[in-house]
């Protein structure tokens, strides 16, 4: 089996990579029969020289590789026919901007495995950069608060070396006794919590958050049943919420009345109710001043997320009275941070963590005849056709 690490070609450039040089060394130690080549790249967080020093061939030609690993979408003109590819294709939700990519993959007899579709037997996702999105998103949210209220001006995350450097920078700042509400309990939210815990910000229960006054910054981490409730007022359960999301409405307004900073780290499923609505944001007793929408669902459950912002320009202002964008320093504006590629700001940490996870969960399947069917579950295309799990994409593929 010959693996190839491809160069990232999407614009804006992405410096992340599936495997760091050290991760490839570990891969080779565990599976000596594996052959590995690395495509030359001038943007990757690890240099060509680092891979060469680790003992790997760096080349511009991966045509003899069996399996090709990347992070973001591969441009159509860079695809190599008849190969196996792993990358985030952003097609499984029928994203119209990548329809041509999936059409080309099928036409070129490419076997596509999407990092998003790598799941265990219970269909729980195994691979992703969510933790790093949470880490950077929390940092950006606090940075935005500091800028808005002219309390401090700390550098962008992308200019710092990693999570520890982000925490060190934040710990030097003085925060007023603000209240921070964090939604979610998955990888994204737990990444954000790493920042808050690293800063030694006090965690409190939802009840205390809503009812008590503090002389120091505090945060609460809430789950779906804390910010959603059944419309009919009957008792709820997580199982019922996931089975019948349309029977629920948002119960987040009680938090929007007391929180200063909202970090959105939840997973938002189809048909789930909106969380932070226009009405909540317009209300005279709304207290939220900064929204770090780490999940970044545009026109989704967070009404002020009008668009995705960028690493270069991460903040914009939301004017609740007009439901429109304004400069974030506008006196009546709520600051919104909605960068949709946050892990790109920590390319080293994100790449190292991703490679460790990929080596643990995915690589063994190539050498044990896929005994747990992990590869089979993850495969979108085979022999020029969609696999049964992803047959629902056929109509999307057929559209011109």
Image: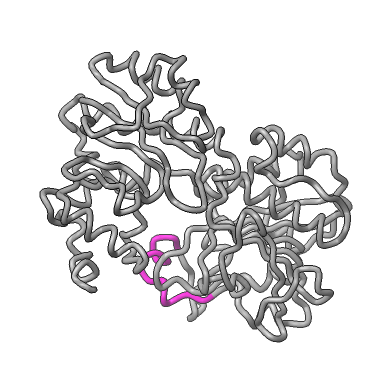
Residue 313: quadrant of the picture: bottom right
Give coordinates of residue 73: x percent, y percent.
37, 51
Give coordinates of residue 215: x percent, y percent.
89, 52
Magenta segment: does it hold 241? yes
Locate the C terminus and report the quarter of the image it occupies.
bottom left
Image point (49%, 74%), residue name: 273
Q: Is residue 199 left or right of residue 51?
A: right
Give coordinates of residue 343: x percent, y percent.
55, 45
Between 31 and 211, the residue placed more toward the observer is 31
Question: Please, which residue is most extreme toward the bottom here?
Answer: 322
Locate the N terminus and report the quarter of the image it occupies.
top left
Magenta segment: does it hold 351? no
Image point (77%, 71%), residue name: 287
Residue 162: quadrant of the picture: top right
Prevailing secondary structure class for the magenta stretch in the rendered image: helix
Total marks placed = 0
Q: How is the image coloured?
A: one colour
Between 196 and 61, the residue placed more toward the observer is 61
Image point (26%, 20%), residue name: 34
Q: Which residues are magenta?
A: 237-249
Location of residue 350 with respect to 185 vertically, above or below: above
Location of residue 234 with respect to 345 vertically, above or below: below
């Amino acid at each position: 089996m010959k693996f190839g690490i491809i160069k990232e070609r999407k614009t804006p450039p992405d410096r992340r990579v599936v495997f760091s040089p050290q991760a490839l060394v570990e891969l080779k130690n565990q599976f000596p029969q594996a052959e590995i080549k690395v495509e030359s790249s001038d943007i990757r967080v690890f240099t060509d020289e680092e891979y060469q020093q680790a003992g790997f061939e760096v080349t511009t030609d991966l045509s003899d590789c069996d399996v090709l690993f990347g992070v973001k979408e591969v441009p159509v003109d860079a695809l190599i026919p008849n190969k196996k590819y792993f990358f985030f294709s952003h097609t499984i939700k029928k994203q119209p901007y990548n329809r041509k990519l999936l059409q080309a993959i099928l036409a070129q007899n490419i076997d596509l495995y999407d990092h998003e579709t790598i799941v265990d037997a219970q269909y729980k996702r195994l691979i992703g950069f969510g933790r790093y999105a949470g880490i950077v998103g929390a940092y950006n949210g606090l940075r935005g608060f500091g800028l808005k209220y002219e309390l401090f001006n700390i550098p962008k995350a992308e200019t710092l070396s990693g999570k520890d450097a982000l925490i060190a920078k934040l710990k030097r700042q003085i925060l007023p006794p603000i209240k921070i509400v964090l939604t979610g309990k998955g990888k994204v939210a737990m990444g954000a919590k790493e920042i808050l815990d690293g800063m030694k910000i006090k965690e409190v229960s939802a009840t205390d958050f809503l009812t008590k006054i503090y002389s120091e910054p505090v945060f609460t981490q809430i789950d779906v049943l804390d910010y959603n409730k059944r419309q009919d007022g009957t008792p709820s359960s997580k199982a019922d919420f996931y089975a019948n999301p349309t029977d629920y409405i948002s119960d987040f307004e009680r938090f929007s009345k007391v929180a200063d900073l909202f970090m959105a780290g939840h997973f938002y499923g189809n048909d789930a109710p909106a969380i932070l609505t226009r009405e909540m944001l317009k209300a005279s007793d709304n207290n939220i001043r900064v929204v770090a929408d780490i999940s970044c669902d545009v026109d989704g459950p967070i009404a002020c997320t009008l668009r995705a912002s960028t690493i270069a320009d991460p903040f914009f202002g939301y004017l609740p009275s007009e439901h429109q964008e304004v400069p974030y320093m506008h006196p009546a504006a709520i600051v919104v941070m909605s960068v949709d590629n946050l892990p790109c700001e920590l390319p080293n940490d994100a790449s190292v963590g991703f490679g460790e996870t990929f080596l643990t969960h995915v690589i063994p399947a190539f050498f044990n005849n896929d005994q747990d069917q992990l590869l089979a579950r993850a495969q979108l295309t085979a022999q020029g056709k969609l696999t049964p799990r992803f047959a629902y994409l056929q109509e999307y593929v057929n559209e011109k």
